[in-house]
Image: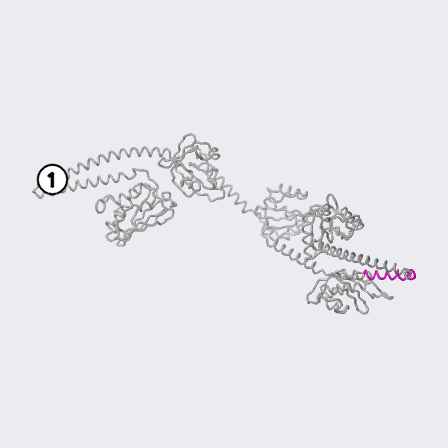
Amino acid sequence: MFSVLYIDDDTPLLEIGKVFLERSGFLHVQTVISGKNALELLQKESFDVIISDYEMPEMDGLQLLKEVRSRYPHIPFIIFTGRGREEVVIEALNSGASFYLQKGGDPTSQFAELIHMAEKAITHFQATSELEKKNEELSSLNEELASIEEELRQNLYEMNIQSKILHESEERYRLVMEATSDGIWDLDLKSKKAFFSDWYYKMIGYEPGEFEGSYDNWRTLVHPDDISRAESEVSYSITHPGAEFNVEFRIKTKQGFYRWIHGRGRVVSWDSDGNAVRMVGSHIDITDRKRIEDALLVSEEKYRILADKSRDLIFLLKIPEIIYEYISPSVKNLTGYSQDEFYQSPELLKHCIAPSFQDFFEKAFDDLIQGNIPDEYEFQIITKSGEIKWVNQRNTPIFDDGNRLTGLQGIVTDITERKMNEEIIREAMKKYEILFNNVPSGIVVTDESGKIIEANQDAAKILQVTRDELITRGITRPEWSIFSQDGTPIINDDSSIITNLKVGRGLSGIELGVQNPYGHLAWIVATSSNLNIKGYGSIISFQDIGEQKRTSQALSMVNKKLSLLTSITRHDVKNSLTALKGFLYLLSENMKDAGDKELVQKITSIAGDITRKIDFTSAYQKIGAENPEWQNLSAIIGSISLNGVQFSHDVSGIEIFADQMLGIVFENLIQNSVMHGEIVTHIALKIVNEGQNLVLVFEDNGVGIPSSEKEMIFERGYGKNTGFGLFLIREILSITGLSIKENGIPGKGVRFEITVPQGVYRTIIE
């Protein structure tokens, strides 16, 4: 592995150059961006070769070369630059540059050539160093021999001079042959015998001299697909004096696989008749370079396939010619025009711009020519069929080594659907703002922590503060006070009601009193829902029920007075009836006449009927006397005595907004089953969802109710005993809009269905 110091102020080129060089498999690259950094690194580390750009700030490539030569005279140095002026090339080579390579063209071939130059420079440097070392040793030996054999040297001076020159020449040749990694060959064109260097054999897996050097043996090793082309090149160079053959072919190794060879050679001797008699040349193993080139071709093909299959339009535009070097097939789906139409008429692009964006496009095009290219922009196009589409174009400019704009690579995406969705969202937001600001209820929106981030004007009006004050300061303690429905202060903000409202835990109909810092108390009914949007907590809507609450309190006071009056009246009447029935009893004891006794019994029965009706008025008066409230079904059922009957139910987590006599409903239903079901041993209560309503289903396993009586059983006075039980149940339920009907099968038990409308029930966490 050879070490390379690579200097270039163009960081992207430096990075890609490092990738290409290291993919050779035998080069390890360190990169710096200036000559100054390079000199600092050379003081710390040694390198086998230096590759440098020419044009760099502070110190250009020639200045760096001269400085390196003054400090490290023998290290190989390659100038790799975009400047191709002849005077620069001459000065670089005169200053000691090993090679000079101009940037530009196909990067695959360019970096392959650079790799080859680096390899050659390193090989030459190593061979030269070894040769100089051998020369120094030989020189030292000759000097020693000269001092010992001074007299002989004097006599044979001329002979020794010639001998020395010949020896040095042979030694250099041998060292070069040993040091170089190229395979050297020397072919006698008449005998077809050849000399193959040690490396010639080694590069294809053989030991030196393992097979005879000859043209025929070379020919048998060349790949069958390459032999015709290779021999054609050799024949041409033989028949055309001065022509050099230069060909790439595959040659079979001892292990049976093929390696790529770059063969070069020329005729060096002719006979007196002008016929070529000797040819020399070299073989360079380029297998690694070929692998790199193949990998790049595969990578380019994959990129093209990806571009061809992309739903987005991908293009490469040449500037300033304004010619498409590539445009993906998806252009057909986007514009209605084919690839060929754009290739043949680049001006077609301007015709695709929607009229409303013509001025925008003209300015963008002028900016493009001047090199002012935004990363992306959005505009409208008109398709071949006349359809208007929104597109997003993302741009990547392409510059040459002189920083001149030479092309534009872009990706164009159809964003029509996104634009339509954005318009729908804008319209929805407008409607939301109108609704938010004009709905006749207070509305506040909280973030995930429960902090108020938005409020409408009605919310501020109900709470008697400004909207800005409500948003910036919120409803904080101790300035604000919050009361429960019965007027009890809610001390802790972490209470279940306040927490559930903040996080939007699906609460509705929560009655609260809210007193602002200025002493104004507002009674509200609040409903909370979770927004399920990142950054948002809940939306809370509430209505001002202050007037309603005051009216309710006044009605409650009137009802209390009426209740007191009717209670006193019922008490006095019942006392009178008790006395009447007592006197009738005494009267009947002294009567002898049967007709008179029957008359007294009828009067006594009427008095009993009056008593029952007074009891009914007492119960009926309680219906609606108190405000309806949210009642927990599990708690109500759990408090009822079942008289030994098995009772199963699953109503946990449900609250019903109903009259406070809701417990009487279930007591009467159970009592009705026990008294009239005759064979009842099991009662069940379950919940069924019907659309947005909730249905409570009460069933027993008794005798049931005849079909002819299913509606009459809810009439006042119908049935056994008082006949008021089911009538009272219907009246209690109707206070808050609940209804009841019987749908059981006669002979198989009753089935009472209580329908609870949406908004009159809610789920809770128990």
Task: Identify residue type, mark 1.
Answer: Leu
Quarter holding residue 593: top left
The answer to whether residue 91 is left or right of residue 105 is right
Percent x, y for residue 281? 78, 62
Magenta stretch contains residue 156:
yes
Q: Is residue 563 above or below residue 746?
A: above
View extreme (front): residue = 148
Percent x, y for residue 112? 71, 56
Count of numbered tags: 1
> What residue do we see at 77% from left, 55% from top?
125
- State the SS at label 1: helix
Magenta stretch contains residue 394:
no
- Colour mapping used in the image: one colour
View extreme (left): residue = 592
Residue nearest the observer in this picture, 9 or 137 = 137
* Residue that mark 1 sits on: 586
* Label 1 Cα crowd, 10 Å radius (few <14 / some 14-19 / many 20+): few
Percent x, y for residue 622? 27, 39
Task: Let me know if residue 670 appears in the view.
Answer: yes
> Magenta region's main secondary structure?
helix
Task: Let me know if residue 743 appears in the view.
Answer: no
Residue nearest the observer in this picture, 174 or 750 = 174
The answer to whether residue 74 is left or right of residue 706 is right
Q: Is residue 15 above or below residue 607?
A: below
View extreme (right): residue = 155
View extreme (top): residue = 518
Quarter of the picture containing the N terminus is: bottom right
Q: Which residues are magenta?
A: 154-172
Percent x, y for residue 694? 36, 47
